[in-house]
Image (cartoon, grey):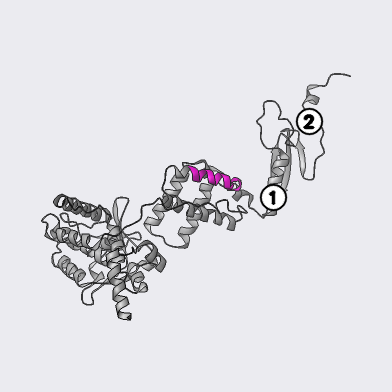
Amino acid sequence: MANKTAKEKNKPVRKTLRENEYYNPKTKRYEYRYKDGFGKNRVVSSYRLEPTDQVPKGKKSGKSLREKEEEINALLSNDIDIDGSKLTLLEVVNRYLEHLYNRKELSHNTKVGYNVTVNTLKQYKLGYMEVGKIKPEHCEEWLADMKKKYRGSSIQSQISLIKRSFEYAIDYDYIAKNPFRRITTDRSDSKPMVAIPVDEMNNFLDFCKNDSHSKHCYDMIYILFWTGLRASELCGLTLDNIDMENHVIKVEKQLQCINHKHVVTTTKTSNGVRYIPMTDGVYNCFQSVLDNRYLKGDIEPMCYDERGNSYDGFVFLATRSRRTIVRAHVEEYLQNCIKRYNLANPDTPIRKFEPHICRHTFATNMQGLPLKTLQSILGHGNVRTTMNHYVDARPSHIQVNEINIIANSIG
């Protein structure tokens, strides 16, 4: 038998091809031709027809045509968008966020939190995987790595966005199942907020009122402790928000630092727009702030919202510059007062705390109010948020007094 020519040597062994399978002699690859869910003609190819076939010399190994064919038919049977299934997780998350931002207006802090998730995903292989190829085991590996670096509460926030992004992918037929459906983590390693005890709070406020270096902060800190205002909401108060006649504060906006500029934003949620009643002490503090409010050079500081609307008449201004303040300034004032207090009281120091703890302390001290009233004052959409995350149980000695008052009134 004569030797085979070079042309004959390169010919593949004849195999029985199925419907829509072809051999392309020009590329020397097997092809599968099909129509996707939108009726578009598509082609996939491989040097190998079956998984057991050998890869031609010098060619890279990859899935055989029959393996690719099986995956495609599985996608088509579930009406999966072939192009969508090839999007990376990061691309799907960005599509979901774009959809979310077009649908409703979100607070600056919420958007910052979402950006944290996107930037974190960029550090992991999972973010660059095609969503159609992501399986629960890939998600579990991501979670295991995340636990080595982040707290439970931080991870859970990121899980929430990723999980919703996969649900978005299901709605748009990119995938059939959510591989993140069972992914969750424990928040118990997060530090819980703890209210400042009443006696410590009163001692601290008395110190701020009488200390020559801290008294300029007294009214502001007192108002935080006795209104439940967020620091950014306090900074966003303007003169028209303070109704001294009816002893009411109207909360309708925040003042935040965005890209090094003081920007007026909406409240954290729609429930954040609310009216807060003033205690007598809060009324007196606002009276003091308004009586002593002055402007440097009679120039009223002005800030703008993201749409270009201007605002002026801010109640709280920086001590020296008389410019508007944001949360970072409130934090700085508070920490300086805590430092001075602890230097003056080394035997009974107060723990360091952030402005938000004042809000938490207010919720705990006011838990005797009707729950819906307290929920409304704090601006929560759900009373469970108020009770589960903001209200601490009172100390035992106070519980003894409270339970005896009720028992005696019944007896």
Q: Is residue 183 left or right of residue 269?
A: right
Give the residue displayed 29% in from the left and 69% down from the top: 400
Coordinates of residue 409 in the picture (x, y in percent): 30, 80
Q: Earlier in the sequence, mark 1 or mark 2?
A: 2
The N terminus lies in which quarter of the figure?
top right
Q: Quadrant of residue 379?
A: bottom left
User: At 72% from the left edge and 39% from the top edge, which residue is drawn?
Assistant: 65
Using the image as rendered, state which of residue 157 and residue 323 is in the foreground.
157
Q: Residue at x 33, y 70 (%)?
A: 374
Asked if one can make out residue 188 in the rendered structure from this viewpoint, the answer is yes
Q: Which residue is mark 1?
A: 74
Q: Foreground mark, 1 or 2?
A: 1
Q: Residue 344 colored magenta?
A: no
* Three-letter amino acid code at the position of disc 1: Ala
Q: Secondary structure at mark 2?
A: loop
Q: Residues within 10 Å of mark 2 (few under 14, many from 20)?
A: some
- Image quarter where the C terminus lies is bottom left
Q: How many marks?
A: 2
Q: Position of residue 357 (x, y in %)?
A: 29, 58
Dot 1 surroundings within 10 Å: few (below 14), some, or many (20 or more)?
few
Q: Is residue 73 left or right of residue 345?
A: right
Which residue occupies the foreground of this view, 393 or 94?
Answer: 393
| Residues in magenta, as a range | 131-144
| Amino acid under disc 2 | Pro
| Residue matched to label 2 | 12
> Is disc 1 placed on a helix, strand or loop?
helix
Is residue 126 rendered to the left or right of residue 355? Answer: right
